[in-house]
Image (cartoon, rainbow, N blue to C red):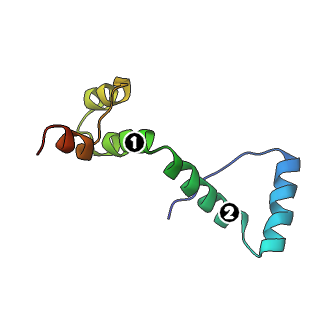
Amino acid sequence: MHRLNLTIDEALYEQARAFGAVKKKSISAMMRESLTQYLSKNSNSNSKASLTIEADDEKEVLAILSNDTFTTNKEFKNRYNL
């Protein structure tokens, strides 16, 4: 696991702390769940993010990020009957 510093305002912190106490969850656990949910909702961006992690160099990363007509491997295989 990695440590992440997050800056939020006092009111949001107090709300999260109180909610966590009611649900018996840490703020970290709630943030992990929220981030997981957020990332799963946008599959196109998530696919681009996965490709940038696997990219070999900066040029390839920039090409992936600049391409607005992104196609997943599955869509490509279906389109070209592979």
Amino acid type shown at disc 1: Ala
Q: Could you tell me which residue is drawn at 33 percent across and 26 percent down?
A: 69
Q: Which residue is mark 1?
A: 49
User: Under tag 2, what secondary structure?
Assistant: helix
First in sequence: mark 1 or mark 2? 2
Q: Position of residue 34 (x, y in %)?
A: 63, 56
Q: Which residue is mark 2?
A: 30
Q: Are marks 1 and 2 in contact (CB under 8 Å)?
A: no
Q: Is residue 47 left or right of residue 42?
A: left
Amino acid type shown at disc 2: Met
Q: Is residue 14 left or right of residue 73?
A: right
Q: Could you tell me which residue is drawn at 68 percent across and 63 percent down?
A: 30
Q: Could you tell me which residue is drawn at 29 percent across and 25 percent down?
A: 63
Q: Is residue 2 left or right of residue 24?
A: left
Looking at the picture, does residue 64 appear above or below residue 44?
Answer: above
Q: Quadrant of residue 51?
A: top left
Mark 1 closeness class: few <14, some 14–19, many ≥20 residues within 10 Å: some
Q: Nearer the viewer, residue 74 or 6?
A: 74
